[in-house]
Image: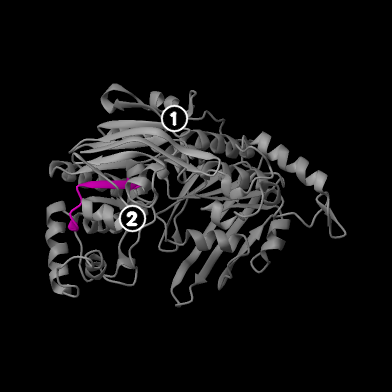
Amino acid sequence: MLYMNGISKRFASVLANDRINFEIREGEVHSLLGENGAGKSTLMNILYGIFQPDEGQITWKGEIIKIQNPNEAITKGIAMVHQHLTLIPIFSVAENFILSRRSTREPFLDLQAAGAAVLKLAQEFNIAIDPWEKVSQLDAGTQQWLEIIRALSRGADLLILDEPTSVLTPQETERLFKTIELLVEKGKSVCFVTHKLQETMRICNRVTILRRGKVVDTVNVCDTNERELARMMVGRDIQFHIDRAPANPNRVVLKVEKVNIQAKNRHQVLKGASLELRGGEILGIAGVAGNGQAELAKALTGLQAIQGGKIVIDGEETSHLSPKQVSQKGVAYIPDQAWKKASFSDFSIEQNSIIRSHWEEPFSKWGVFNRKEISRHAKNLVGGFDIRTTSEQMLAKSLSGGNMQKLVLARELSRTPNLIIAVNPTAGLDVGAKEFIYKTLLGERTKGRAILLISADLDEIMELSDRIAVIYAGEISESIPVNEVNLEEIGYMMAGGKQGHD
């Protein structure tokens, strides 16, 4: 069905795709794997018409084609569902559905017809949905399904799914897999871009592995395993499950007592949230994105005002301190999308390495920067955290997602914090970068640091946490020791079920 032959793409001095050959057959689910910066996104963006290749050609259904933009891709039957969905939250399901058909000859504002079409597709895929419900009220899995049927409604024969399970509960992930299986039964093809090897083994027929812009191999899933795929991705053996000693909790470092946060629209985003965290342990907060995690992390770091309750760090109330004051209490913050929220892409790696402490000695004195000390500090972080760059003078935007995450982690930990708040610390990262960050966080735990891990990735929560709690609709459940956790129950609670249900 699709053949990309000899595709090359260069950005300045970086060769992102190097004569790549990539094939997708009709009616198959084909996984695209590779480290961050391996060239997967560039290749898919070329296929979807966002980038143009410097060399090579694309053959689609036996015809050599050029795809100038995403509209052309969709017209030819190639659609993409991005990791960050493109739905409009304040619009209904039917309104979002009809937006996808704006360039067709069908009636543009026939909402009743759109609603009927949604119900028909929902019946085909066994999805319960109300066409008139606001998208903001839908769970993440149903929103993603809506994106998929929007693409199908425009005649897509090939669907590119970019990190499709990154914010889904286990139940929603399984529902997505059932949708994919139905698509294949209808003769559709799926390109499944993911970092989760177990998902490749579960749902895909074949897998192509990229490393540093080149194809390593294309293999049948039935002829390989997770360990071999990981080895091809990163060029070395990966430790999937990290051995760790039992936690040795000491003093209470963080105490959150009945904290309430109200959004600008007066909606309660945190409702009496309480938790306790000790040094030498990792408390995992599981939950689907949008249930108050962002507001909780911001409140703990002084970025969000609270309307009730209190936050106590090392015995001192910090509820109304500024971000700088909280930071000086020994709090490290690794937000999700660190490349966007915790760095300046047009600053150098050196400059980013001291953002949180540029006013302190030894980096500055009496308002004058100590360039030699800043350079030494940046070199230590780059070397110690295996941040792959040709120079600390390079702009931060030259780094891959995994290396940017390492830079933020290195900077925060270099300040020897007592409390580490990490939000989705490995979202979208490859297995090599994940392994490094997991080992680093567990190393900090061994040093006696208190770590609050807020993540939508249940596998990550299970791998790192000593205790687990669930956040849903702004409420935090009682924590459970990880060795007593029932995965089905955690997934049920992430979807809104009550703790201890029968």
Tell me: residue 100, above or below residue 47: below
| In magenta stretch: residue 16 | no
Q: Residue at x 46, y 77 (%)?
A: 266
Tell me: residue 88, above or below residue 186: below
Which quadrant would residue 325 be assigned to in this image?
Answer: bottom right
Check the image and tell me how it is coloured. Answer: one colour
Horizontal side, residue 104 vs residue 245: left or right: left
Residue range in magenta is 153-164
Q: Are marks 1 and 2 in contact (CB under 8 Å)?
A: no
Tell me: residue 275, above or below residue 214: below
Which quadrant would residue 289 be assigned to in this image?
Answer: bottom left
| In magenta stretch: residue 154 | yes
Callout 1 secondary element: helix
Local crowd at mark 1 within 10 Å, few (<14), some, or many (≥20)? many
Q: Amino acid at mark 1?
A: Met
Q: Residue at x 48, y 33 (%)?
A: 212
Q: Which residue, given by chain and number where applicable, does mark 1 sit on? A: 233
- Residue 163 shows in this picture: no
Mark 1 or mark 2: which comes first in sequence?
2
Local crowd at mark 2 within 10 Å, few (<14), some, or many (≥20)? some
Q: Which residue, given by chain and number where applicable, does mark 2 sit on? A: 69
Which quadrant would residue 9 be assigned to in this image?
Answer: top left
Horizontal side, residue 374 vs residue 470: left or right: right
> In x, y percent, where is residue 431?
46, 34
Q: Residue at x 60, y 60 (%)?
A: 300
